[in-house]
């Protein structure tokens, strides 16, 4: 990466952390400037407006998700092993790098009553995430590891469901047994769809 | 209800709508005063501080949930019928009265990095919601409709999961098939736990 790109990525990392914690709307360019130790005008040169910054943060979140969750999983054997790798990396990414939540879901909730470009961007990234999981399920069917009549979209929505509740139960409810239940739900889901 | 209580409930209804839409932190007493057509000082007499208002909105959301979701279901026959009634009323409540999301989950996401009284309140209400669903599953076991080895907490967490993804898929992703998948997941969950 060039030095300029590198700086931008570092700024977006900080911005993502701030947005996740205080909200995307509450995050001002002035606030971000304080956090990264740059001038407000310097940041304006990078991001032009708050909405442009919000859109770039969302793209950055989706990009790091691909880098940290999807790409390492693609190196695994096609089928259930790869599907499980996506789920494991996903949980790791949210717990270790995003304080136990998903920045795209956080954004979805914040913007769900505010139509516009930001909402469209969130929709695009989350739908693409659903399709990635559904495709991983489909590959496991092609590999004859999951049953032929498996519905990849249903399975993907269920996986997404379990991850959403995992975050809510662990982070908000501080339910110590939720992680074990999450694992049980996933194992049983795969089990009942085996070929 | 007395006139004073009635007024307070109406204000809290408006406040809940605003909080769900713009966020709990963005909701100021001034903003609320404009919406309900009262003076700021009049509202301060009711709510004292923004945090007090946030706490009261959350209690109000939990109270209306009990009134609209749990109480009507308690009139139904103990067992699967009652469990299904809770889920149906829950979805109705979020879709018809909360524009397709759950105000407690919205609050959970907004406050998940801000420890304090508000976060504790959200934790209390969501944990209590989990226990209510788990208890409904347990009753269905006692009625010998669900299998003896059903894990009510696992089943409750799965039901919660499906509802969370239902909201995200329908509202954010605008996925027209998500509702049908949600119903399938629930039916299959009950099916595989039948006595």
Image (cartoon, coloured by chain):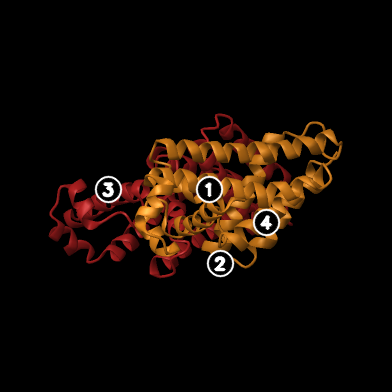
Chain colours: A red, B orange
Residue B107, horizontal then vertical, whole percent: 47, 48
Q: CA distance from mark 1 to mark 3?
A: 28 Å
Q: CA distance from mark 1 to mark 4?
A: 20 Å
Residue at the spot 49% in from the left edge and 48% down from the top edge: B57
Mark with earlier residue (2, 1) = 1
* Viewer-side label of 1, 4: 1
Q: Dot 3 corresponds to which residue?
A: A14
Foreground pick, A106 / B120: B120
**Residue A72 visible (yes or no):** no
Residue A6, horizontal then vertical, whole percent: 22, 52
Foreground pick, A71 / A117: A117
The quadrant of the picture occupied by the N terminus of chain A is bottom left
Q: Dot 1 corresponds to which residue?
A: B104
Mark with earlier residue (2, 4) = 2
* Viewer-side label of 2, 1: 1
Query: Do the numbered discs 2 and 4 sit on residues whose CB atoms are within 8 Å?
Result: no
Number of numbered callouts drawn:
4
- Discs 1 and 4 lie in a common subunit: yes
**Residue B16 visible (yes or no):** yes
Q: Dot 4 corresponds to which residue?
A: B182
Q: CA distance from mark 2 to mark 1?
A: 21 Å
- Discs 3 and 4 lie in a common subunit: no
Q: Is residue A194 above or below residue A109?
A: above
How would you rate the neighbour count of disc 2 (Cα within 10 Å): few for under 14, some for 14-19, many for 20 or more? Answer: few
**For the residue labelled by badge 2, is the local secondary structure a helix, a strand or a loop?**
loop
Q: CA distance from mark 2 to mark 3?
A: 30 Å
* In the image, farthest residue toward the front: B3
């Amino acid at each position: 990466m060039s030095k300029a790109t590198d700086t931008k990525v570092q700024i977006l990392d900080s911005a993502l952390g701030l947005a996740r914690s205080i909200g995307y709307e509450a995050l001002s360019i002035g606030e971000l400037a304080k956090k990264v130790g740059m001038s407000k005008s310097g940041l304006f040169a990078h991001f032009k407006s708050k909405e442009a910054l919000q859109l770039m943060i969302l793209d950055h979140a989706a990009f790091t998700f691909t880098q940290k969750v999807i790409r390492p999983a693609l190196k695994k054997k096609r089928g259930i092993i790869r599907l499980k790798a996506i789920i494991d990396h996903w949980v790791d990414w949210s717990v270790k790098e995003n304080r136990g939540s998903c920045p795209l879901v956080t954004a979805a909730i914040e913007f769900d009553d505010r139509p516009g470009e930001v909402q469209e961007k969130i929709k695009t990234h989350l739908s693409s995430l659903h399709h990635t999981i559904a495709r991983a399920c489909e590959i496991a069917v092609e590999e004859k590891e999951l049953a032929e009549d498996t519905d990849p979209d249903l399975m993907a929505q269920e996986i997404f469901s379990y991850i959403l509740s995992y975050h809510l139960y662990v982070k908000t409810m501080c339910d110590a047994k939720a992680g074990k239940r999450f694992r049980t739900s996933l194992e049983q889901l795969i089990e009942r769809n085996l070929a």
